[in-house]
Image (spheres, rainbow, N blue to C red):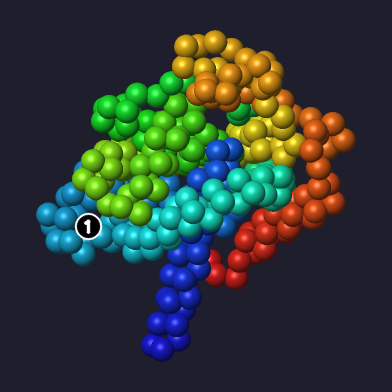
């Protein structure tokens, strides 16, 4: 009995840390929490748990009470995982944002190594590829690549748009390789949601809480609907689905290449600037696109050796996580 309790606590602690890793990953545009879920072995269980929030769970609630409902939706798993994700989001909003501001090359390098190793891990898990799975791999790669090349839109901050952005972004969160935060960036909602979240941490206000509540409801609705699609494709086309997800990972590397230089800005009037020196001092501009360059062409110190080291650390972390001793 004591051993069972210790094992249960160990599993819960492991799941909590995996949730934290997912939450921190989602703060960074270009890195997907779904990737962390996959390489830590909880991806399919997560999809099935979210999918189970349905009419059958309501029936279980009526017949067996709250315990039956909780068991039907794998409630303990979801609770511990989402607690970890909430903690990871808080840590990420503070620590990761600081690191991105002061050590951007190393943070991007770490995640580049992590995503690259994840691509090979997912591809190996797919097994022998056939024609349709190769097609899925190519489609996934091109889809993720073109998404990373898209320019951010101007977001709307009304509650309906906030809810819809949550539903769309969580779809990306559930896909390894496509970042929910990057989708928010494309929708023009990333800065608004993140700043609201940070403000709520330091100074809780009703308006900010309402925005995050609506955003959260949108996420739940989007997750429940999309998890059904993922679970269905896994059960019927597992190899092709894994190949598609591997493609998403490969294509997303375009977004997280460490050495990038800004190449296009726009101001509030829609005017475009291709040279930072031409931007007026009082202009409020938004970066539209960046160009990937080789380390030798980077205009600042590329920190090549240290960035390569953190890439290797990121790749090694994939191996360690995938070999986790605790199976959930």
When asked about the image quadrant of residue 176, the answer is top right
208 or 235, which lies in front? 208
Residue 193: x and y, percent? 39, 38
Residue at the image position 21 percent from the left and 64 percent from the top: 67
Left or right relative to 300: residue 322: left
Viewer can see residue 132: no
Residue at the image position 67 percent from the left and 49 percent from the top: 103
3 or 255, which lies in front? 255
In the displayed orientation, state which residue is furthest to the right.
296
How crowded pointer 1 is (Cα within 10 Å; few <14, some 14-19, many 20+) is rated as many
Question: For the image shown, how many numbered marks are present on the structure?
Answer: 1
Residue at the image position 61 percent from the left and 19 percent from the top: 279
239 or 323, which lies in front? 323
Above/below status of 131 relative to 174: above
Above/below status of 25 relative to 284: below
Residue 177: x and y, percent? 59, 39
Above/below status of 252 relative to 56: above
For disc 1, the marked residue is 69
Question: Which type of secondary structure does the marked residue at label 1 adopt?
Answer: helix
């Amino acid at each position: 009995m004591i051993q069972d309790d210790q094992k249960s606590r160990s599993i819960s602690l492991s799941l909590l840390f995996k949730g934290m890793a997912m939450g921190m990953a989602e703060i960074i545009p270009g890195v997907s929490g779904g990737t962390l879920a996959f390489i830590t072995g909880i991806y399919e269980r997560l999809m099935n748990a979210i999918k189970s929030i349905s009419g059958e769970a309501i029936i279980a609630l009526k017949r067996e009470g709250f315990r039956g409902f909780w068991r039907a939706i794998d409630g303990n798993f979801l609770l511990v995982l989402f607690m970890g994700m909430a903690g990871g989001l808080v840590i990420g909003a503070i620590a990761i944002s600081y690191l991105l501001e002061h050590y951007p090359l190393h943070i991007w390098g770490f995640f580049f190594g992590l995503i690259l190793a994840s691509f090979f891990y997912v591809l190996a898990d797919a097994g022998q590829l056939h024609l349709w799975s190769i097609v899925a791999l190519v489609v996934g790669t091109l889809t993720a690549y073109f998404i990373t090349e898209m320019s951010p839109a101007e977001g709307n901050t009304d509650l309906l748009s906030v809810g819809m952005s949550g539903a769309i972004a969580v779809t990306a969160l559930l896909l390894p390789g496509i970042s929910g935060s990057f989708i928010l960036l494309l929708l023009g909602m990333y800065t608004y949601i993140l700043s609201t979240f940070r403000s709520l941490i330091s100074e809780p206000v009703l308006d900010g809480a309402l925005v995050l509540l609506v955003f959260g409801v949108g996420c739940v609705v989007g997750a429940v609907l999309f998890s059904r699609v993922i679970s269905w494709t896994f059960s019927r086309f597992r190899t092709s689905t894994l190949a598609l997800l591997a493609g998403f990972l490969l294509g997303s590397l375009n977004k997280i290449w460490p050495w990038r230089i800004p190449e296009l800005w726009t101001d509030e009037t829609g005017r475009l600037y291709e040279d930072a020196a031409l931007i007026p001092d009082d202009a409020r501009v938004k970066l539209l696109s960046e160009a990937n360059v080789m380390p030798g062409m980077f205009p600042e110190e590329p920190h090549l050796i240290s960035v390569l080291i953190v890439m290797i650390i990121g790749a090694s972390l994939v191996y360690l996580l995938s070999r986790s001793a605790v199976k959930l």
